[in-house]
């Protein structure tokens, strides 16, 4: 289990051979993103974010220009995601 808080963060230009090029959030973990960007990442699934846990995305955070080989260029979700006025 775990908790991660990202504020004014920029996660970019990462690549994973499996899941979650920018962020991989496991089933027993929680991430809060505020005024952060996840851009230009690559993976098989969930180029930007691969989520099986819980993510709250708010305060003008952005997930864009990510790529996946199979599914979920920006986001591959198998958990809970709460968006509060965000761009995907």
Image: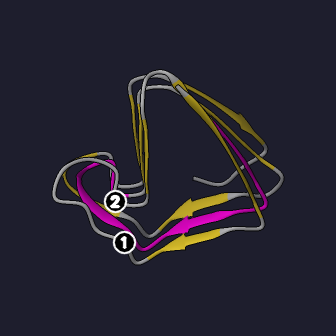
Which quadrant of the structure image shows residue 47? bottom left
Instruction: Establish if 52 lies above or below 23.
Output: above
Who's the residue at 65% across and 54% down the image? 87
Whether 49 is among the magenta residues is no
Query: Magenta span covers which residues?
Result: 31-47
- Give the spatial CA distance, label 2 vs label 1: 6 Å
Who's the residue at 40% across and 78% down the image? 13
Who's the residue at 25% across and 58% down the image? 43
**Residue positioned most to the front:** 1
Position of 54 with respect to 51 (left or right) is: right
Q: How far across and down, in percent of the image, does residue 41 sit?
A: 38, 68
In the image shown, does 69 or 12 lie closer to the viewer?
12
Where disc 2 sits, the SS reads loop
In the image shown, does 64 or 4 lie closer to the viewer?
4
Whether 36 is among the magenta residues is yes
> Which residue, given by chain and number where applicable, does mark 1 sit on?
14
Position of 56 with respect to 50 (left or right) is: right
Q: How many dots with numbers?
A: 2
Q: Do the residues labelled 2 and 1 touch (CB within 8 Å)?
A: yes
Which quadrant of the structure image shows residue 14? bottom left
Q: How far across and down, in percent of the image, does residue 10 sit?
A: 62, 72
In the image shown, does 79 or 7 lie closer to the viewer?
7
Where disc 1 sits, the SS reads loop
Q: How far across and down, in percent of the image, does residue 7 sit?
A: 78, 59
Magenta: predominant secondary structure element? strand
Which mark, by number, is residue 82?
none
Which quadrant of the structure image shows residue 84? top right
> Which residue, given by chain and number where applicable, does mark 2 sit on?
21
Task: Tell me how the rendering is colored.
Answer: secondary structure
Who's the residue at 42% across and 57% down the image? 48
In the image shown, does 28 or 47 lie closer to the viewer?
28
């Amino acid at each position: 289990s775990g908790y991660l808080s990202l504020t004014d963060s920029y996660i970019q230009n990462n690549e994973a051979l499996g899941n979650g090029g920018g962020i991989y959030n496991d089933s027993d973990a929680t991430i809060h993103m505020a005024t952060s960007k996840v851009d230009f990442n690559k993976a098989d699934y969930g180029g930007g974010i691969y989520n099986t846990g819980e993510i709250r995305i708010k305060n003008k955070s952005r997930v864009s220009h990510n790529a996946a080989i199979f599914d979920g260029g920006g986001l591959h979700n198998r958990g809970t995601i709460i968006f509060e006025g965000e761009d995907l």
